[in-house]
Image (cartoon, rainbow, N blue to C red):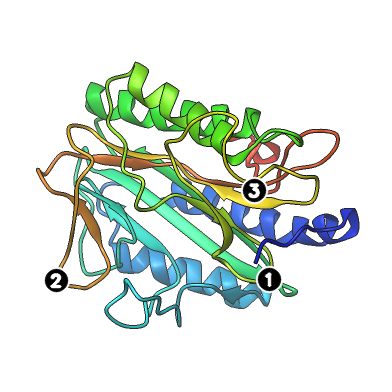
Amino acid sequence: MIELRTPAEIEAMRPAGRFVAEVLATLRDDTKVGTNLLTIDNRAHEMIRRAGAESCYIDYHPSFGASPFGKVICTSINDAVLHGLPHDYTLRDGDLVSLDFAVSVDGWVADSAVSFVVGTPRDEDLALIDTTQRALDAAIGAAVAGDRIGDISHAISQVARADGYSINTDFGGHGVGRVMHGDPHVPNDGKPNRGYPLRSGLVVALEPWFLQTTDELVTDPDGWTLRSVDGSRGAHAEHTVAITADGPIILTDRSFLGVD
């Protein structure tokens, strides 16, 4: 069921968005060559406990997951792009890292993701990250009351295809509110002027993600981590966005911290 939030409820979601933004900014700054993925998860867990927040991941067990996730952040590395289950891996020079984080604060959820390179970057990785971020910016720009879901999807796909990337629509954006994954589904490809009408009060997580040379995924033996079928690298960007009569509000915006 698609739920619309009142202006007061959107204001009540701001603390969750701000906390998610702060955690991702902190973890991005702390994550270097030599950082272990379990250390990232432990640090996120510590910040959740200190804030009195609640993880959306640790007990999460959807139909596509082999078991409850068991960790509080997704850490997807190189050819892994979504749902990366933290494990005993120490980051190496040039690794492409995607962190995806969602929590509930006072009963309201926010969800966001960021991709970056530790150490010496490859040009093709920076180009992929840039395309993913510009696709997210385009999606947010299209999140306007009176338009439709297809306008957001089309905005994402236009950026990706212009840069030569193909698109997988199995996983994409989604409604956010009292739960992490709600209606509507927001695919990363679509036709303009199609789909559910965008109305003031709709809150969605918009999340373009792309792989360098494929749009096909395989699942790791851990039952969660999704990787490219050909070993090419992936990047993922996500913000929680409220659609209002005055335009989109990025609830997980990190710019107040002086970072993108």
Residue 117 in the image: x percent, y percent? Answer: 31, 38
Label 3 crowd (10 A; few <14 / some 14-19 / many >=20)? many
Label 1 to label 3: alpha-carbon separation: 16 Å
Please, what secondary structure does the residue beneath circle 1 have?
loop
The residue carrying mark 3 is 252
- Cβ–Cβ under 8 Å for marks 2 and 3: no
Q: Is residue 152 above or below residue 13?
A: above
Q: Residue furthest front?
A: 194
Quarter of the picture containing the N terminus is: bottom right
Q: CA distance from mark 1 to mark 2?
A: 31 Å
Which of 142 and 58 lies nearest the eye of the viewer?
142
Q: Earlier in the sequence, mark 1 or mark 2?
A: 1
Mark 1 or mark 3, earlier in chain: 1
Residue located at (68% from left, 55% from top): 17
Q: Residue drawn at (43%, 22%), measured in percent from left and top?
A: 158
The amino acid pointed to by label 2 is Pro
Q: Where residue 221 is drawn, which disc sits there?
A: 2
Q: Name which residue type carries label 1.
A: Arg
The quarter holding residue 16 reads bottom right
Q: Residues within 10 Å of mark 2 (few under 14, many from 20)?
A: few
How many numbered tags mark residues here? 3
Q: Which mark is residue 178?
A: 1
- Residue 161 location (% of width, % of height): 34, 22
Where disc 2 sits, the SS reads loop
Q: Amino acid at mark 3?
A: Thr
Q: Name which quarter of the figure residue 90 lies in.
A: bottom left
